């Protein structure tokens, strides 16, 4: 094969196809599909993926491939195929589909280099440019970019004196360490050892260590193991007995820790019944999608662990997805304890290098289990035996940028490819999944009982309007306060949950209701206490805090909503004896902070854990007997048809943190809308009733799971343009689509302006619309030019999870 079809790293409509390149002789037989290459593309060089090989090119003259970046393909044939499928499913570019499957470290980065075209050219250079090329013929653009000489450079580039060259950096950054290996025959080394004198005892130790290992070892490791400095090792290198090498090492964030091996539990009857059909599928290489519907603490994770164990015994591999926020050290520990070094962990807390290293362990088949967040679904395993999605209802499984894929769809697609089971687990499944299980599309597995046979915690709902009427202006209701005092006296622990971003509090005028909003985005500004400033969370715009209302000049302009900081302050006032751990985006942004704070709580050093969404899931502390939800309604008021579902899920998850072990648990939910069914039913732990009621509402309003949704969002600086484009799109669609399909809009998006760009949308609700994808593709093509030249954006989200 002498020609390679390459998808190039230029995300645009015109380049969204394979281009042919000649394979130079030296790489014939070496280059295969799935490898990354560097190819000339127009005036520059770009990275690309080889997708196919062929004998002859479509066009007469093809340029040769400039460089080869991989020696083994980074995308397996299966992943290449998934790439094609993603472009159809999410309407993304090929290149975006491939890139999302790889760790960030492997994405192409380009260095722009400037090189002098000829020696003679030096004379003609601009006076400001000349000194740069005094003793060399090329330099990096970054050196020039910010200097006063930049315009002069532009001039000389235009004159053709200097050429711009794009150099692809970054073949992935392997980390290496200095190591040594034996450099003499065994006899010679033994001879030498016998002749060493007493003072050289350490050198002797090193040599016998190396004889034992009989491989390359990092100098650091030898020194640590033998408790010596590197001096004796250096001495041996100088004597020629050891030779220096570069060893590739992994950056393993968990390497310093020892995990005590754990044994599988004897399964309960319920667990045994749930695992049986999964094990059957694993044994017979069958594909089913199982929905494991089990209350929190019912032993789902144990079922996952034992299913994975079975997969490993068959010599196959498993992927387990966990939402980012529940990928806690506790979770990782459970997997490492069971499967030891066979586990790779992928999550956003890792540095780019660490992620790359974990990924390479998978690629080299050094591990057979991956635990990770969304993108781990693309782990390059080739012999998959099981895929699991824990907390399947979590919206973080949907990527909110291109490609807008849902990990559940990818998992099921891969499960079909490998003929292996897929498990979706949740205490509060999405309506979509539960409806599929009801229809028999998924197989339902139910775990009704909690492990410790304890009943679900009792839940009290407190009407905060009543509290206000009776004169309690604090953020703690009388009931919650009394219960907190009681737990502190008993030495038990409390979790306080605030359904909000850590520092979120907005400002409102108590007299006229004025709320300061961002002038670039239609969204209320957030008060940041430490800087004493108002900030926009979308664009970063900052303002000074008002002392009086700009509308009515009242002085009663105040901070509203209680961020975690504010709750913490109030706690220290009303319960000064309590030690509090606060967990939110502010306190956990530093690496390792998350774990440190949790340890402080786990060890009993603190009695109250106060936090946002991130404490709602996965945490398991035996001593927690009280959970307080400070404001249950914040999520209910979002302009999203899933608002009730999300509220129900969240309240159920939070309640599940209490009474997981011997001590019984209590939950207090504070709310301004106590009568709302999602709050009522969450307090009764009644998923089935919630499912019934919510399904009726969805049916009535034509929402999923009864209808599919597609959301088209248009944005531009000019509002007239936005409205007219959105209008044309919705008219076009209404002509072409079937009359059963509803088209809502054009209307302003819930956030009508972001970063000075207006946003309009139209939403489609459809049941069966085979021509929808081609029509949407046509729209993207039709506006291609305007999107490129006039900065118009059209995003299409099929099965959207974010309506904003
Ligand atoms: P879930 O994932 O449904 O929240 P877990 O698997 O975490 O539930 O189980 C809850 C607790 O019960 C954990 O501490 C776990 O170690 C324990 N557990 C699970 N299965 C068993 C079993 N068969 N026997 C004893 N303890 C178990
Ligand atoms: Zn006012
Ligand atoms: Zn803004």
Image (tube, helix red, strand yellow):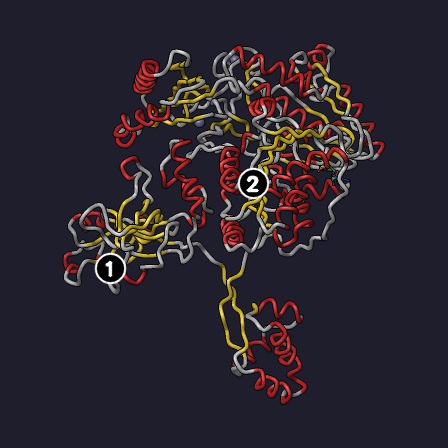
- Whether residue 745 is visible to the viewer of this picture, yes or no, is yes
- The residue that appears at 62% across and 80% down in the rendered structure is 203
Q: Position of residue 443 (x, y in %)?
A: 61, 29
Q: Residues within 10 Å of mark 2 (few under 14, many from 20)?
A: many
Residue 348 image offset from top left, x and y in percent: 54, 43
Ligand 1 quarter of the rendering: top right
Indicate left or right for 485 with 350 as reference. Answer: right
- The picture quadrant where one finds residue 307 is top right
Q: 172 or 223, which lies in front?
A: 172
Residue 570 falls in image quadrant = top right
Q: Using residue 319 as the reference point, say whether residue 46 is left or right of it.
A: left
Badge number at residue 83: none
**Can you see residue 723?**
no
> Residue at horizontal 69%, vertical 50%?
337
Task: Describe the element under mark 1 as helix, strand or loop.
Answer: helix
User: Which of the pair 412/486 is nearer the observer?
Assistant: 412
Give the residue pinned by disc 1: 131
> Where in the figure is residue 168, as x and y percent of width and height?
34, 53
Residue identified by numbered label 2 = 420
Q: Check the image and report above or below for 501 versus 99.
A: above
Marks 2 and 1 sit apart, C-alpha to C-alpha, by: 65 Å
| Residue at 53% over, 40% down | 419
Marks 1 and 2: in contact by CB < 8 Å?
Answer: no
Residue 216, given in percent of the width and then of the height, sits at 55, 70
Q: The N terminus appears in which quarter of the rendering?
A: bottom left
Q: Secondary structure at mark 2?
A: loop
Left or right? Give the position of 535 relative to 16: right
Quadrant of residue 734 within the rendered picture: top left
Q: Is residue 91 above or below residue 745?
A: below
């Amino acid at each position: 094969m002498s020609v390679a079809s390459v998808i190039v790293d230029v995300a645009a409509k015109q380049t969204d196809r394979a281009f042919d390149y000649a394979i130079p002789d030296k790489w014939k037989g070496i280059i295969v599909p799935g490898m990354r290459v560097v190819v000339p593309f127009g005036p520059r060089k770009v990275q690309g993926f080889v997708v196919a090989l062929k004998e002859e090119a479509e066009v007469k003259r093809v340029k040769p491939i400039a460089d080869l970046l991989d020696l083994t393909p980074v995308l397996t044939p299966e992943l290449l195929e998934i790439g094609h499928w993603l472009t159809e499913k999410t309407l993304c570019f090929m290149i975006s589909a491939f890139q999302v499957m790889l760790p960030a470290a492997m994405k192409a980065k380009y260095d722009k280099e400037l090189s002098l075209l000829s020696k003679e050219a030096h004379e003609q250079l601009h006076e400001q440019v000349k000194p740069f090329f005094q003793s060399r013929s090329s330099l990096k653009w970054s050196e020039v970019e910010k200097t006063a000489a930049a315009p002069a450079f532009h001039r000389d580039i235009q004159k053709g004196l200097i050429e711009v060259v794009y150099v692809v950096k970054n073949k992935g950054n392997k980390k290496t360490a200095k190591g040594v290996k034996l450099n003499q025959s065994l006899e010679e080394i033994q001879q030498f050892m016998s002749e060493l004198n007493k003072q050289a005892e350490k050198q002797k130790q090193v040599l016998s260590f190396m004889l034992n290992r009989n491989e390359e070892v990092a100098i650091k490791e030898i020194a640590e193991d033998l408790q010596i400095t590197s001096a004796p090792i250096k001495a041996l290198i100088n004597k020629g007995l050891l030779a220096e090498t570069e060893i590739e090492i992994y950056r393993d964030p968990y390497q310093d820790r020892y995990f005590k091996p754990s044994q599988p539990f004897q399964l309960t009857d319920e667990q045994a019944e749930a695992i049986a059909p999964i094990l059957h599928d694993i044994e017979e290489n069958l594909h089913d999608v199982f929905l494991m519907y089990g209350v929190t603490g019912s032993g789902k994770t144990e079922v996952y662990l034992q299913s994975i164990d079975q997969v490993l015994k068959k010599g196959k591999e498993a992927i387990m997805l966990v939402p980012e926020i529940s990928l806690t050290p506790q979770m990782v520990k459970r997997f490492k304890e069971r499967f030891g070094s066979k586990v790779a962990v992928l999550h956003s807390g890792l540095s780019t290098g660490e992620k790359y290293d974990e990924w390479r362990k998978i690629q080299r088949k050094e591990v057979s289990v991956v635990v990770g967040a969304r993108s781990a679904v693309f782990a390059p395993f080739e012999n998959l035996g099981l895929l699991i999605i824990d907390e399947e209802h979590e919206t973080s499984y949907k990527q909110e940028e291109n490609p807008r894929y849902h990990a559940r769809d990818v998992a099921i697609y891969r499960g079909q490819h490998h003929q292996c089971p897929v498990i979706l687990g949740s205490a509060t499944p999405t309506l979509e999944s539960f409806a599929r299980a009801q229809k028999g599309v998924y197989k339902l597995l139910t775990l009704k009982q909690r492990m410790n046979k304890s009943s679900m915690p009792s839940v009290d709902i407190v009407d905060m309007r009543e509290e206000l009427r009776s004169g309690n202006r604090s953020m703690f209701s009388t009931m919650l306060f009394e219960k907190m005092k009681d737990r502190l006296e008993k030495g038990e622990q409390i979790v306080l949950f605030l359904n909000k971003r850590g520092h979120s509090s907005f400002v409102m005028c108590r007299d006229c209701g004025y709320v300061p909003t961002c002038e670039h985005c239609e969204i209320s500004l957030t008060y940041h206490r430490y800087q004493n400033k108002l900030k926009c969370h979308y664009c970063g715009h900052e303002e000074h805090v008002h002392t009086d209302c700009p509308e009515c000049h009242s002085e009663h302009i105040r901070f509203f909503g209680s961020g975690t900081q504010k709750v913490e302050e109030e706690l220290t006032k009303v319960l000064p004896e309590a030690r509090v751990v606060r967990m939110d985006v502010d306190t956990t942004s530093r690496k390792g902070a998350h774990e440190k704070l949790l340890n402080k709580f786990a060890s009993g050093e603190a009695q109250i854990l106060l936090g946002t969404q991130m404490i709602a899931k996965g945490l398991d502390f035996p001593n927690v007997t009280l959970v307080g939800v400070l404001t249950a309604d914040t999520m209910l008021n979002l302009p999203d048809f899933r608002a009730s579902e999300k509220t129900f899920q969240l309240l159920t998850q939070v309640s599940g943190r209490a009474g997981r072990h011997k001590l019984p648990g209590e939950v207090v939910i504070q709310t301004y809308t106590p009568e709302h069914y999602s709050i009522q039913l969450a307090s009764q732990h009644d998923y089935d009733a919630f499912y019934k009621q919510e399904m009726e509402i969805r049916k009535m309003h034509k929402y999923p799971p009864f209808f599919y949704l597609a959301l088209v969002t248009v944005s531009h600086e000019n509002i007239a343009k936005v409205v007219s484009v959105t209008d044309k799109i919705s008219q076009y669609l209404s002509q072409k689509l079937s009359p059963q399909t509803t088209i809502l809009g054009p209307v302003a998006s819930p956030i009508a302006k972001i970063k000075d760009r207006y946003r309009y949308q139209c939403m489609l609700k459809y049941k069966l619309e085979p021509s929808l994808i081609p029509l949407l593709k046509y729209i993207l093509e039709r506006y291609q030019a305007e999107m490129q030249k006039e900065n118009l954006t059209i995003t299409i989200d099929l099965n959207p999870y974010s309506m904003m």
